[in-house]
Amino acid sequence: DKYVPAQEYYDYKSLVLDNLTQDASLLRERMAFLVFEAGICAAFLADYWPPLRDRETAMFQFFVDAFRDEGEFILDPAPTSARVRLVRPLEDGEPGRYLRIDITDDPERLFEANPPSATDWATILDSTRQTGISTVAIDHPLSWEDAGEIPLHLIDHQLSNFDHAVLCVDLRRSPNSQALPLYLKRHAIPLRQLTGNPGDLPRVNRVSVPPSATGAPNVIYSFRILENEMQQDATGKTLPPPPFTFARWDKVLIPSFPIALAMARFQVKPEDVRIVLGDHIRLGDGPIIPIDAFGQLRTPLGDPPRFPFTTAEAIETDPGATASLLTGGLPDCALFINSQNTAPLPWQGPARLLRTASTIDALPR
C-alpha cells in the first residue's frame, strides 16, 4: 500500500473544494440570470398575455386582502395601463326606478290583436318613448308569423329611439346546432372574460323561436328560458328553471334577462364584463353580483320594491294618467311584463323579476 503524505492530501482536498465552490458560484450566477430573465419576460408578457396578467392581479389582491384593514375594497384598472391597479373602497348601490307596464288580455280590445301584433307594439313603444324614459325592456320574446316588413321596420325604428332596449329569446341545446345569430352576437361576452371552468355553465346552440325584430343595434338580446334546464317535480309539474346568469354558446356567453337589464341600466359594454365562477360578476363600474360555481345568482333578494304600475292600454289611451305616475322623476327603465304568461320562468313571476332587478341595482360597486 502507498500512503499519501498528509500535506499533499489536504492540498488536494482544498483544490477540489475550491473547484466545487467556483462551480457552485457559477451555477448560482447562471440560475440568478435565468430567474432575472424569466422575471423580465414575465413582466413584459403580463402586458400582452391576459392569463398571466390575471394571475398577477390575483396575487396583488391576495396581498392587499392580507394587509389592508379598512373595510371592503375593489381593484380598478388605471386608464393608462392594464397592469396598474387603483384600490378604492366599495360604494353602496341603490335600487333603480322602474315603470312596470303589463301586457294584459286587452279587455277593451284596443289593439288589433291579442297578444299585441307587431303594429301594436310599434305604437306602444312610440307612446312609451314620448314619456321621456330612455331604457325599455320586454320580458318575453317578440315573434310573429307573417308580420310584414313595414311593421317590423317600425318596431326596429322605435327601439332604436331608446338609449338602450333589452329583449329576450328562449334558448336550447340541440343535436342540430345553428350559427350564432348576429343579434345575439352584438352584446355577447367573450369567453376569455370568464375565470373558472366554462364547462360548468349551461350550453346552448339554438334559438327556440327566432325573434322578429332584430335590426336595431342598440338592442341587448338576452335569454329568458333555457329549455334543457327545465325540470319536473314528482307530480309531473314543470318547475321554474334555475336562475342562471349566463349560457355558453361556443366561445361567447349570452346574458340572462336580469343581467342584460343591469348592463343596459349601467351602460356596460360586453368587453367590460368580468365573470369569476363561484365568486362574482363585475359589470364595469356597475354592481358586483355574487354567483355560485355554476353561474347562478346567490344573493338574497331585497324587500319588494314599490314602483309605478300601468298597462299598455293605459299608455295608449291616457297619457295624462301615465304622466301623473312619473311625478317623482323619470324611471330608469320601462319594464314590459306579459301578465298572461303561464310558462315557468326563472324569476317565477313579475314581482320576483322586479325584486331581482332592484336587488342587483342595490349591490355594492
Image: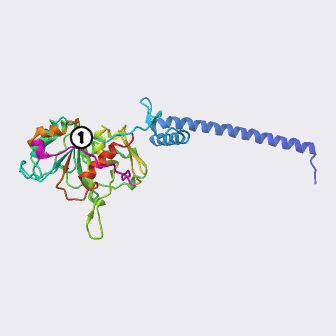
Q: Say above or below: 332 vs 250.
A: above
Q: Say above or below: 235 vs 325.
A: below
Queried whether the magenta region covers residue 308, the answer comes back as yes
Q: Say above or below: 127 vs 236.
A: above
What's the amino acid at mark 1?
Cys
> Taken as a whole, is the magenta stretch helix, strand or loop?
loop
Quarter of the image that includes the C terminus = top left
Residue 203, percent from left and from top: 33, 55
> Which residue is under mark 1?
333
SS at mark 1? strand
Q: Quadrant of residue 30?
A: top right
Would residue 239 be visible to someone looking at this image?
yes
Q: How many marks?
A: 1
Q: Say above or below: 6 vs 228.
A: above
Q: Quadrant of residue 237?
A: bottom left
Queried whether the magenta region covers residue 194, the answer comes back as no
